[in-house]
Image: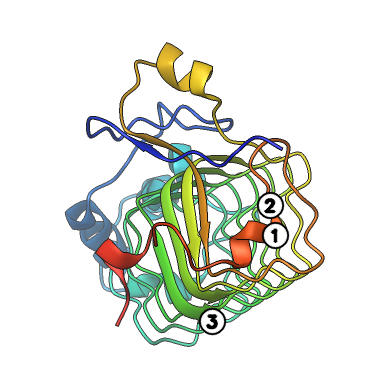
Amino acid sequence: MLAVVFLFGCSSSSNSGVGATTTTKRPTTTDSTITMASIAPTTIITTTTVARASECAIFVDDVCPAGGLDPRLACIPNCDGLDLSGLVAPGLSTWVSFEGADLTGADFSGAFLDGWTMRRADLTGARFVGADLLNVTFGRQTMVRANFSATSMYQTLFCGVDLTEAVFDEAMLESAGFASTVLDGASFAGARTLTEEEYLANGASGTFGVLFYGTSVDGVAPSVNFGPTPEAESTSGENPCTLDSPE
């Protein structure tokens, strides 16, 4: 088993992992606010086509979910503490805060999570299949049976999270950290991180590798090249959550 590596270099927001979205439109928070205001019933819109285009601007490539827009997304950008259980928002790409929200069974497949705030949110059974996670910290929350299959993660942290039976199959964890986290029964089948050779070939910028600190890994299906190994249960080494620890 390849030893876990976590190197620090120059700051970079490049995500070169499998499934990375290099051309994804990233609307600003201001754009999102205007977008949601523009679909209010009192707004005069000349055609249905224009209205739909405005509504869908918060999704990757301006494509709304096949089943239509969930009206609860009108809370964007501040959806803290709301009951959004079962939310269907695949491909959501605008910045949003879901801190403390009920997102049980939510679907964020194919979404672009750039700096989203999701601490303390209940993400039991949530789906992030094929999503891109960049600079996201999950903290002190339940994510039992969450599905991260084929996701791409860069500078993503799980701090004090229950990830029992979570699925990370075929994911690219370019740089990620797990601390005081439960991964019992989780699966990393086919998941991988960058090798040192790949890191150097990409210009040796940013960070790469996966760290485990004080994490329970009973019955875990290991990844291609980063484990987790039994040493993940140790509290020795560096805690990746110390610099960004949720209260």
- 165 lies left or right of 55: right
Which residue corresponds to the image point at 23% horizontal and 62% vertical from the top-left?
33
Image quadrant assignment for residue 186: bottom right
What amino acid type is highlighted by mark number 3? Asp
Which residue corresponds to the image point at 49% horizontal and 68% vertical from the top-left?
235
Element type at marker 3? Answer: loop
Q: Nearer the viewer, residue 223 or 108?
A: 223
- Crowd band around label 1 with a 10 angstrom C-alpha radius: few (<14), some (14–19), many (20+): few
Quadrant of image for the N terminus? top right
- 104 lies left or right of 159: right
Residue labelled with disc 3: 122
Q: Is residue 67 visible?
A: no
Residue labelled with disc 2: 168
Q: Nearer the viewer, residue 239 or 202?
A: 239
Which residue corresponds to the image point at 35% horizontal and 21% vertical from the top-left?
204
Element type at marker 2? Answer: loop
Which residue corresponds to the image point at 56% horizontal and 66% vertical from the top-left?
234
Q: Nearer the viewer, residue 221 or 156?
A: 221
Q: Nearer the viewer, residue 58 or 15?
A: 15
Q: Reading the chain from its start, which is encountered first: label 2 or label 3? A: 3
Element type at marker 1? Answer: helix
The percent coordinates of residue 116 (x first, y second) are: 35, 60
Q: Reading the chain from its start, which is encountered first: label 3 or label 1? A: 3
205 relative to 149, above or below: above
Disc 3/disc 1 C-alpha distance (Å): 27 Å
Residue labelled with disc 1: 230
128 relative to 194, above or below: below
218 relative to 225, above or below: below
